[in-house]
Image (cartoon, rainbow, N blue to C red):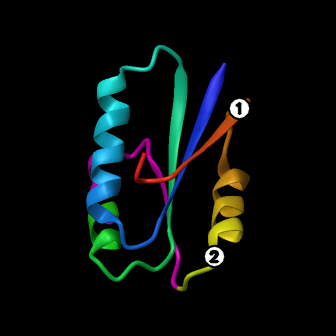
Amino acid sequence: MTLSIIILNYNHKNLLKNCLNSLEEADLKLDYEIIITDNNSRDDSQEFLSQLEIKNPDLKIILNKKNLGYAQANNQAIKLARGEYILILNPDV
């Protein structure tokens, strides 16, 4: 079983960092992928994600040039998902 974890971010860089750290610390015992969509954040989130992508090429990151809204941005990520199951996770979880 593969799980696709989709995280939509908009101006929540610090919450996103905490969320990603929590996923790492959870030591999930299953195959999973993480797809992060950023909706044109103005708080340095896109710079953080660009650097994160360099350090971890397994992450899939979508950097939108405008805020597409919740549904459309999540649908972008779902189209890239390869998992049998999809978890839409907000960065404040």
Q: Is residue 80 left or right of residue 26?
A: right
Which residue matches tag 1? 85
Q: Position of residue 78 (x, y in %)?
A: 70, 52
Q: Which residue is mark 2?
A: 69
Residue at x 53%, y 17% (from the top left corner): 30
The picture places residue 40, in percent across and down from the top left corner, at: 46, 80
Q: Describe residue 36's horizontal placement relative to residue 88 as left or right.
A: left
When asked about the image quadrant of residue 67, the answer is: bottom right
Image quarter of the N terminus: top right
Quadrant of the image containing the C terminus: top left
Q: Is residue 67 above or below residue 14?
A: below
Q: Nearer the viewer, residue 22 or 49?
A: 22
* Residue name at image x 53 percent, y 76 percent: 64
Q: Image quadrant of residue 12?
A: bottom left
Q: Residues within 10 Å of mark 2 (few under 14, many from 20)?
A: few
The amino acid type, in three-letter code, at marker 1 is Tyr
Q: Amino acid at mark 2?
A: Gly
Q: Which mark is residue 40?
A: none
Let me know if residue 52 is in the magenta part.
yes
- Closest to the observer: 53 or 10? 10
Q: Is residue 23 above or below residue 7?
A: above
Q: Is residue 83 left or right of residue 49?
A: right
Q: CA distance from mark 1 to mark 2?
A: 22 Å
Disc 1 element = strand
Residue visible at 35% across and 71% down?
A: 46
Magenta residues span 50-65
Question: Is 13 left or right of 61, judged from the image as shown?
Answer: left
Pinpoint residue 68: horizontal percent, then vertical percent.
Answer: 63, 79
Mark 1 or 2 closer to N-term?
2
Count up the numbered dots: 2
